[in-house]
Amino acid sequence: MDLELARLPVLERYKLLIGLVIPRPIAWVSTWSENGVANCAPFSFFNVISEEPPLCIVSFNRRSDGAMKHTLKNIRRTGEFVVNLADEGTANAMHASSAELPESESEFTKTGLTPVPAKMVKHPRIGEAAASLECRVERRIEFGPEREMVIGEILLIHAREGVVDPESRRISEANYRPIGRLFGSRYSTTRQRFNLPGSLPPGELP
Ligand SMILES: Cc1cc2nc3c(=O)[nH]c(=O)nc-3n(C[C@H](O)[C@H](O)[C@H](O)COP(=O)(O)O)c2cc1C
């Protein structure tokens, strides 16, 4: 089957793309609103794309009423944001925080999360998250009225106790159990990890 995207309705493209490119990592982005309400929401059009400079991308569409997502509004206003990484223990809160709340209501309050001051940006990090990446906007790219991508420079990583080994700086497989997004309300764990035989190309860490 060949599916030429230009011939497909936008919703069909979306369904195909988010169903095929799985599991996707989830940026659980936290920000303060202009009026001091702590906001957080998950975004799975997300990844890290570079270590020098250290960069991540997050891509936003519109709220159901066509308005700009509150997260993007807060990022545009301040030029900063925090990407928190959800794991099995915080999965329910992450999913619930995707609700389209009015700007005056906090997803932190609704889901029982704790806003903790970040170190290098003015927004809060999620206290319960496995790790948080404090980011400054490197640039924004608008792809038309519906889509906008933010490239963030990662300034600081905060990791929950036990997630990063202080000596080797390796990530603990036992203590970090990230989840990935599949489609709709479906997610995957990373419980079945495996090695493949053979050598790695130069530059890939063993
Ligand atoms: C797991 C998950 C991933 C999501 N990924 C995205 C995404 O990549 N881009 C986007 O614009 N919305 C995404 N959403 C929807 C937003 O989380 C949702 O619109 C949220 O209400 C935005 O909140 P805000 O207006 O407070 O920023 C996702 C939702 C879920 C549950």
Image (cartoon, grey):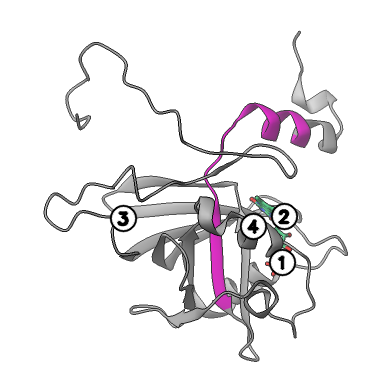
The verdict on label 1 being within 8 Å of ligand 1 is: yes
Please report the residue visible at 38 percent of the width from the left and 53 percent of the height from the top. Answer: 55
Quarter the C terminus occupies: top left
Residue 104 point in image, percent of width and height? 75, 85
The verdict on label 2 being within 8 Å of ligand 1 is: yes
Between residues 200 and 116, which one lies in front from this camera angle? 116
Mark 2 or 4 closer to N-term? 2
Query: Which residue is label 1 attached to?
Result: 69
Q: Is residue 12 above or below residue 49?
A: above
Left or right: 203, with 1 as reference point: left
Residue lying at the far bottom in this picture: please name it. 35
Label 3 to label 4, Cα distance in Å? Answer: 20 Å
> Which mark identifies residue 54?
none
Query: Which residue is label 3 attached to?
Result: 163
Mark 2 or 3 closer to N-term? 2
**Residue type at the position of mark 2:** Asn
Please report the residue visible at 76 percent of the width from the left and 56 percent of the height from the top. Answer: 145
Residue 24 point in image, percent of width and height? 56, 39
Label 4 to label 1, Cα distance in Å? Answer: 21 Å
Query: Which residue is label 4 attached to?
Result: 92
- Crowdedness near tag 4: few (<14), some (14–19) or many (≥20) residues, C-alpha within 10 Å: few
Left or right: 205, with 25 as reference point: left
**Which label sits in the foreground, 2 or 4?**
4
Mark 1 or 2 closer to N-term? 2
Magenta stretch contains residue 17: yes
Please report the residue visible at 65 percent of the width from the left and 37 percent of the height from the top. Answer: 182
Residue lying at the far top in this picture: please name it. 1
Marks 2,3: beta carbons within 8 A: no
**Residue type at the position of mark 4:** Asn
- Crowdedness near tag 3: few (<14), some (14–19) or many (≥20) residues, C-alpha within 10 Å: some
> Which mark identifies residue 61?
2
SS class of the residue under badge 2? loop
